[in-house]
Image (tube, coloured by chain):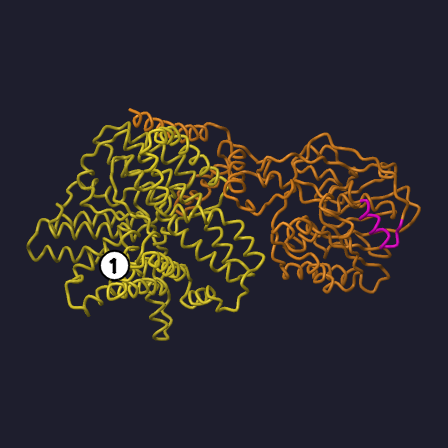
Amino acid sequence: MADKIKNSAVVALAALFIGGFALWSLLQPDAAESVAERRPLAQLPELSAESVLSGAFMTDFERYTLDQFPLRDAFRTVKACTALYAMGQKDNNGLYVVDGYVSKLDYPLDTASVDYAASRLQFVYDRYLAGRDMDVYLAVIPDKNAFMAAENGYPAFDYDELCDRVRSETAFARFIDIAPDLELADYYRTDTHWRQESITDVAAHLLAAMGAEADAPDYTVREADAPFYGTYAGQSALPLAPDALRYLESDTLARCTVYDYETAREIPVYALEQAAGKDPYALFLSGSKSLLTIQNPDAETDRRLILFRDSFGSSLAPLLVAGYKEITLVDIRYIAPAILDRFLSFEDQDVLFLYSASILNNSETMK
Amino acid sequence: MLFSSIPFLYYFLPCVVLLYFIVPKRAKNTVLLLSSLFFYGWGEPRYLLFMLVSIAQGYGFGLLIEKYRAKKRSKWFLTASVLFSLGLLGYCKYADFFVENFNALTGLSVPLLGIALPIGISFYTFQILSYTVDVYRGTVPAQRNIIRLALYIAMFPQLIAGPIVRYADIESQLGDRTHTLEGAAYGVRRFVLGLSKKVLLANVLGALVEAFKATESPSVLYVWLYAAAYTLQVYFDFSGYSDMAIGLGRIFGFRFSENFDHPYVSRSITEFWRRWHISLGTWFRDYLYIPLGGNRVGRARWLRNILIVWMATGLWHGAAWTFVFWGLWFAALLMLEKLWLLPRLEKYRPLGHVYTLFFVLLGFVLFDASSLSGAGATIAALFGGAGLPAVTAESLYMLRSYCVVLAVSAVAATTLPQHLARMAERRPPLRTALRVAEPAALLVLLAVCTAFLIDGSFNPFLYFRF
């Protein structure tokens, strides 16, 4: 009798689970995108004789069923917790957690990638800067792994080795070592980026190194209304507490204007509505933008800066305004450097190449 | 279609089970056959034709062999059927291997045919071969109902990675089988346990194997981790599939033979092959080794028979010299055991375990290698012969990251879990606890496997390529 009850329970539970989720899958409307993973979700593929015979329909259908499975995010959380806490794995899909900070494994040092990145910077120098009386600087932002990987037994590329390599390939630039100004607490726990409120010393160091010292502005720390779940929060699928997304305001910044070459419009320094969007870090200078110019009407100098940067530069650039009348931000992941002279003139500006170590080690997106 | 995929688990399987159990008894075989053809066609629509032609020739020659039983023509029909089956397998699986070697020997440049291997062809070809041979021998009657024969050949639970089912074993079940709650519960249990072996152990170990293959900082430790992980991965991958096949079969009222019996507890290679891929080992024994004379011949012919059987076993796994040498590797070990070593291994049992695991592990390094030189380099690296450092930061990290999975897999590969379950069954309070916990535990495993599938990438079964 006891066996019969057990057998009934086994069959009934399995049937309910599989049948229930099968029905749920069929009945629920398809979602267009995953907020947690920040990507569009696969949609039901088109059925045709050609797609079936080639096998493309089956492949796409499998991707569709994975993406549209009910409670997908909850299942991803179950998987992440099982892998990390039940199976004792040190990372889940390359993401690991130390003291509440999430980071992504990035190793080994990809010398080809670093060399490629350096070659793109060299291209910019040769094309626009060589032979002109312009001061050129280079700074490399350490990623979170530099502060939390090695001491916790996680493999990571050597930040110093990467710096040495990129410096040796970019002898035209004076290197500014900002690593001593940074520590793990200067980064978000759930995101790859640094916190703007924690990098005023980095900005001061850079300004000083470029001879553009300015009195430390009187910043007011503001906090975005929405909780900040960084890119690693969604990718890791772990139940993590959100970060607070803070930004620094000052009277000068309030008067600064930002010109966006893509839309030919002015945009705010802080796009506050982005804090509740898919990419909250886009609060800083509206996120991914190929070409921007910040004008500082309060500047007591005529100095201008061209900042070749990645996304880390979005939160740093407003802090450099104190030392410059104009800062132009160029992201050569979104604009080919060969056409920059259509928009910019290279004359007597300072030039700072500011890149995160992880971008240099994964530089395939640089044009 | 993979068993360990969302389309199978949450689309195909519930539809087939529902349809199978609501149709009248006379239509159940048709439902299973059509769903099996859909299952096969899902992955390989173009190769459905190969399968249908194979079914047709097996059916037709089976009837002809029986019709002319004890006459010379019967032998001719058997020969034709065997040649057709082996010819198709040879064309699809071995043609390019022979062309490559022919080119290498002659210096010519005969173009390769570039034929993609139809999934499961090695398995269903051997099932057809055993059927026609058994009809010829008179051990089974020819099947006159083509749906039943087609179902025997194409039944989706065991279609693409075995076990290699003998027609004699399920002949009666094709015509009349019972469906019980106990059988269904057993089937669900076996299926979920097999799915867990594949998804939670084999796939996770596979990630370690892939990481090793991609690393730029290998070490001796890393090579050992790889070899151990791959040895366990192959077992849990393949035995997991067999568990799922046996479980699904039982849900539909079929009883398939066991294919694995804890091979890594073996004390000799001889014992290992009695426990590993049992359906293939017994197939070669019954349809090749014994017809060649088995061990009832002189020593030289006996050793020749062993060599032939193991070379064929190696070749069955793949058209590459690594597989041939993998088979010969075991042939050499089996000969050594039969001629000298076996009594000594019986005497020193712990030594037998170590010896068996060691040579099986080396064998799987050869099995996984893309070339003989690659296998040699990896085996040399295991013993520090490649100038690798003892450890690297990455290999230490991998050890820390995978030690729990490796330990759990090693224990799960033994008979210990089974012993513990039996012990618990003998003690009433534990037995009651087990009965209560089992349905919940299976549900949790199913949910966790689903979670891994949703989060994971495509992980085909290793044995699909054979």
Identified by mark 1, the residue type is Gly
The x, y position of residue B234, in whole percent, is 39, 52
Query: Which chain is the one coloured yellow?
Result: B
The x, y position of residue A214, in whole percent, is 90, 47
Q: Tell me which residue sits at (80%, 48%) in the image.
A: A202
Q: Tell me which residue sits at (14%, 55%) in the image.
A: B77
> Is residue B91 something that shows in the picture?
no
Query: Which chain is the one coloured orange?
Result: A
Magenta-drawn segment: A200-213
Dot 1: element: helix
User: In the image shown, does B466 or B285 lie closer to the viewer?
Assistant: B285
User: In the image shown, does A191 or B330 lie closer to the viewer?
Assistant: B330
The answer to whether A123 appears left or right of B416 in the picture is right
Q: Is residue A207 magenta?
A: yes
For label 1, the residue is B87
> Is residue B93 something that shows in the picture?
yes
Quadrant that contains the N terminus of chain A? top left
Give me the chain letter of mark 1. Answer: B
The answer to whether B82 appears left or right of A313 in the picture is left
The x, y position of residue A235, in whole percent, is 59, 41
Q: Is residue B2 magenta?
A: no
